[in-house]
Each structure stands twice: as C-alpha cells, then as structure tokens.
Image (cartoon, rainbow, N blue to C red):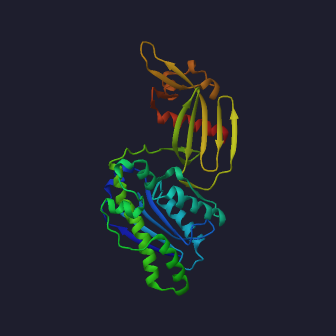
C-alpha cells in the first residue's frame, strides 16, 4: 500500500460554512472493473476536519494488487482519526458506496459506509436540472460547465487499462497518470460544492450520544399517535439486527440504522390553533404526566405545530435506548 498526502491550499471557506461544525470527506475510488468481484485499486479523499488546519488530500494506492484490504482498513482509520461526519461524492450512492461495502464484506472487514451520510453531487444535479441545462451529467461536463480546468485527460475506463499495465510493468509514468486522474476527480469536487449556492441545502443531522456512542438523528416523523426517530452513523461496524417492544415504545436495530418509536399525544391550545406534541409518558415511561413539575413536562414537549424540539427528541431517544440496552 502506498499512502500519498498533500495539503489542500485553495479557498474552502464555503465548505465549512455549509457544513458548520461537521467534518467532511470528499471521496472517489478507482477499481479494476465494475463488478463487485473486482478490486479497489485506489481511494482518494479530500478531508476538512478539526484535525487539519487546512484541507488534506490523501490517496491510498493498491500498488501491488495485493493491498486492497490494507487500503480499506486504513481508510477507516483515517475516517475515525478525523471524526468524519459527512461524505461528498459524485455518483457515490450508485457506485462508490455499494462497491466499498461489497468489498468490505468479501474481505471480511467488519465495517460499512452509510449512504444516508453521503451527498451525491450527481444526484443533486439531476434533481435540479433547471440550474444545469446540459445533456451529459458526467463529472467532466459539470466541471466544464462551471469553468474548472482538469489536468488529466483519461477516462475511468482508461484508468482500468493503465492500472493493469502498471501492475505488469511498474512503469512510474503509468502510476502518475492513474494518481492524477483520481486526484483531479476529488480535488474538483470541492469547488463543485458551490452548486449549493443555488440549491436549498438539506438540514444537517443533529448529533446525539447514546450509551457513550455518537449517533445522528437522521429523521423524525409523526404517524398518527406515534413518533418515529431514525438514528445512524456515517461508518460503523454492521449491527446485529434486533427488535424489542414494550407498551408504548419499540427499539428496532437494523444493520445500518436504528429506529426508535414511541407513543405521543397531540394537544390543542385553548383560544388558538397551536398544537403541542408531547410524549405519552404514561405508556412510554410509566410516568403520570399530570403529576410532573412544569419544568419536567417541558422536557417531554417534542413539537409545537411543525417546529421540532430536537433537544427533547434526543432526550427521549436516550431514555428509550437505555431502557432496552
């Protein structure tokens, strides 16, 4: 395995502005074929985190065709070291993430990536075609559209052919071409993130801690008298599926994410149309709501009309999580 690191010296203030206090990794992989039976030969990343004063470019190269497992393990070492919260990719939902997870499983590396924490720029562009009036939605066409100059001249298909030639010949010029192709892919994704200046940015997930482990609240929705909270993490070992249910709440552990649901009540305020959504403490926690102090009652208020009280949602999720585990 060969590890290459470079400083990212260009302006990236718009990245930190978009992601607030979250740590980001732009990622792109190169493989020696499209089948999940093929190997990952290169993982490229641009990392922006609290651990780096400037952005950092890292490439993990499988230079001997035997280091795939090593580069995957090192990939997760870096994600943990930089406490990555979100990924940015181009076609990552359809290619990079499924390919990485398939290879992790094949190599018996007990990790996985969670697509819910990936911002796929290709998907964003396709969903907002009004801003991008061109026919071919490739990374190179988008780069050209916003005026990015690319140094390399090869395609992904060319990269596969050149890699096999490199393995046979160990020609350093071939290695340089392969690395440059991946380097341009990851470097050019950073300014592409500026497309969010024209597009409404999705709300970032709220951080929470359950049993001393960090999670993120992916979503919270109400269905009749039930609140359903979806929790997850960008990268963790696959979970053992389990399901627990008691009166008033359920805990459903999936391989990637955790679903906690609990009963709620909706109360309409007198002399107004305001609707309060509260936890049904009687059934969920065996607490008589009417007997609680005013300050305690407020901790079980999870929404006023459409405004969610995220802090209280985290609070009840922690209580239910500790009840089952």
Q: Is residue 47 above or below residue 67?
A: above
Asked if residue 313 can be seen in this view, the reply is yes
Give how far across and how far down residue 163 sits, in percent.
Answer: 51, 78
Q: Quadrant of the C terminus?
A: top right
Q: Nearer the viewer, residue 149 or 193?
A: 149
Residue at position x 42%, y 74% from top?
154
Q: Is residue 216 left or right of residue 237?
A: left
| Residue 104, picture quadrant | bottom right
Asked if residue 285 can be seen in this view, the reply is no
| Residue 25, picture quadrant | bottom left
Give how far across and how far down residue 271 sits, in percent.
Answer: 42, 12
> How many marks overall?
0
Q: Is residue 195 left or right of residue 109?
A: left
Residue at position x 53%, y 57% from top?
94
Residue at position x 56%, y 72% from top?
32
Q: Is residue 107 left or right of residue 25?
A: right
């Amino acid at each position: 395995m060969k590890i290459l690191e470079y400083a990212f010296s260009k302006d990236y203030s718009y990245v930190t502005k978009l992601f607030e206090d979250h740590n980001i990794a732009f990622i792109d992989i190169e493989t020696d074929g499209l089948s999940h039976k093929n190997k990952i030969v290169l993982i490229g990343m641009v990392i922006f985190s609290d651990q780096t004063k400037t952005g950092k470019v890292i490439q993990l190269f499988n230079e001997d065709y035997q280091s795939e497992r090593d580069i995957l393990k090192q990939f997760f070492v870096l994600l943990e070291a930089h406490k990555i919260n979100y990924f940015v990719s181009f076609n990552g939902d359809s290619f990079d993430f499924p390919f990485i997870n398939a290879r992790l499983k094949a190599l018996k590396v007990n990790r996985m990536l969670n697509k819910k924490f990936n911002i796929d720029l290709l998907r964003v562009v396709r969903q907002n075609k009004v801003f991008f009036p061109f026919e071919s939605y490739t990374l190179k066409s988008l780069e050209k559209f916003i005026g990015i100059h690319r140094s390399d001249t090869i395609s992904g298909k060319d990269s596969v052919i050149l890699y096999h030639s490199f393995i046979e010949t160990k020609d350093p010029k071939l290695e340089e071409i392969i690395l440059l192709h991946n380097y341009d892919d990851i470097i050019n994704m950073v300014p592409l993130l500026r497309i969010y200046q024209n597009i409404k940015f999705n709300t970032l997930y709220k951080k929470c801690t359950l049993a001393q482990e960090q999670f993120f609240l992916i979503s919270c929705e109400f269905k009749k008298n039930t609140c359903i909270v979806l929790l997850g993490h960008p990268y963790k070992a696959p979970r053992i599926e389990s399901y627990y249910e008691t009166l008033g709440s359920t805990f459903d552990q999936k391989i990637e994410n955790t679903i906690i649901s609990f009963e709620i009540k909706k109360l309409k305020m007198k002399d107004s149309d305001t609707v309060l959504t509260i936890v049904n403490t009687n059934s969920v926690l065996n607490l008589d709501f009417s007997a609680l102090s005013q300050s305690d009652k407020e901790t079980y208020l999870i929404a006023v009309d459409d405004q969610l009280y995220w802090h209280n949602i985290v609070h009840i999720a922690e209580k239910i999580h500790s009840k089952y585990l």
